[in-house]
Amino acid sequence: MAKKTKQDILKLAKEKDVKFIRLWFTDVLGRVKSFSITDKELEGALENGMGFDGSSITGYQDIEESDMIAMPDPDTFQILPWRPKEKAVGRMICDILNPDKTPYEGDPRYVLKRALERAEKMGFDHYYLGPELEFFYFKADNSADILDKGGYFDLTTLDVASDLRRETVLALEKMGIDVEYSHHEVAPSQHEVDMRYKDALEMADNVITYRVVVKEIASKFGVYATFMPKPIFGENGSGMHTHQSLFKGSKNAFFDAKSKDFLSSTAQYYIAGLLKHSKEICSIFAQTTNSYKRLVPGYEAPVYVAWSRRNRSALIRVPLYHPGQEKATRCEFRACDPACNPYLTFAAMLQAGLEGIEKKYKVPKPMEQNLYHLSAEERRTQGIETLPDSLGHAIAITEDSALVKKTLGEHIFPRFIQLKKKEWDDYRIQVPQYELDKYLSVL
């Protein structure tokens, strides 16, 4: 696909009567930051970027070195469909640069670009991703009051959730994001809209756009959408199962027609790398204290470090191969949740997989039995490890990881560790209602 030029954007903005352009980027935690410019500033922004104070962005610069440049990526220009058509609002996602125009080490988008450069040097032109983001609709942002009591694939009556999904799909398509399907998920008031797979950088951009769109459309209908991993006790949490594959040109590097299971040695090394480093990168793909309320056995969230061809209790699933579907050969990493920073998460998974390919890690035997039904002793005998059970546990493992340090870089790595340690400390000193109910009257 041809790259958009500065002139393309200026022409498009004029044709669509665009008056305002929002420049988007994310902080280290993946939260979208934005500021607006007018059409009069657009040409200058495309040429030289727009300066801003980086010291106020989580995980960015110290105050004495705070000048940063937001350089818009023309390929990400889209019209925001929920804003008025007259004097319309456009948006572009930005790369963050230093004042001398070099890439800023603290930009999560740059972390993913570095990982993709490594893949390219190893001969892989494409890192395709298909994440499945789940989310909840609630009546407001201050309580988990559900809108429906539907379950997986339920056809609920024509209520607000049906219109919400419809309007969300239409808005995503207007923003150039291809949608494959949408449906009700397992938990009450839980939903999923699946995007068609794309190259990693475009998909990371699409994920942050998707989260904004879902929330904007919900707000338009007077309800609240949340990507919080586990908002309702006793119900399934929201995941972001991520399908992934590596290609060399148009050839799927994960497929081998001569292999018994049609998985190439590259795919097996990649899966082995993901498994081996999954605990180290856990604090990235499950980055909140609440993430670990989801990562518990029994709620379809995989916690056991194993892989399988069909078994959804395993951390990695390889969908069955169908003849003529060579390009669809892929692995599905099932532990990510939708509150993560997609740039860092995709980079971490790719680097873990590439490490496996480069060092030829041996993939363990697939586990086809339901891992939830095995006892702790049986899992231990078979060498099946578990993911960390808390953010504190996860960040302690991450802190010792050479792979994560290489992935995040010298700037983000210590800041990410510091932020997550503080979050864990803030969390563990709380006195929840559970403890008051359990202990106050008897101790």
Image (cartoon, rainbow, N blue to C red):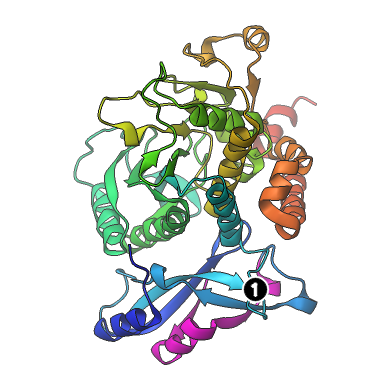
What range of the chain is rendered magenta?
A: 34-57
Q: Neighbour class for label 1 at 10 Å: few (<14), some, many (≥20)?
A: few
For this rendering, which residue is in front, 343 or 417? 343
Quarter of the image that includes the C terminus = top right
34 displayed left or right of 85: right
**Percent position (x, y) of residue 313?**
49, 21
**Percent position (x, y) of residue 216?**
38, 62
Q: Judge whether residue 340 can be spotted in this image.
A: no
**303 shown above or below 374:** below
In which image quadrant can residue 175 be found? bottom left
In which image quadrant can residue 312 be found? top left
83 displayed left or right of 101: left
For this rendering, which residue is in front, 181 or 427? 181
Q: Judge whether residue 232 can be spotted in this image.
A: yes
Quarter of the image that includes the N terminus = bottom left
Is residue 185 covered in magenta? no
Amino acid at pointer 1: Thr
Q: Residue at x 35, y 57 (%)?
A: 218
Is residue 44 covered in magenta? yes
In which image quadrant can residue 149 be found? top left
**Percent position (x, y) of residue 340?**
55, 48
**Percent position (x, y) of residue 49?**
54, 81
**218 shown above or below 89:** above
Asked which secondary structure carries label 1, the reply is: loop
Residue with the most extreme bottom position = 40
Report which residue position mark 1 lands on. Answer: 102
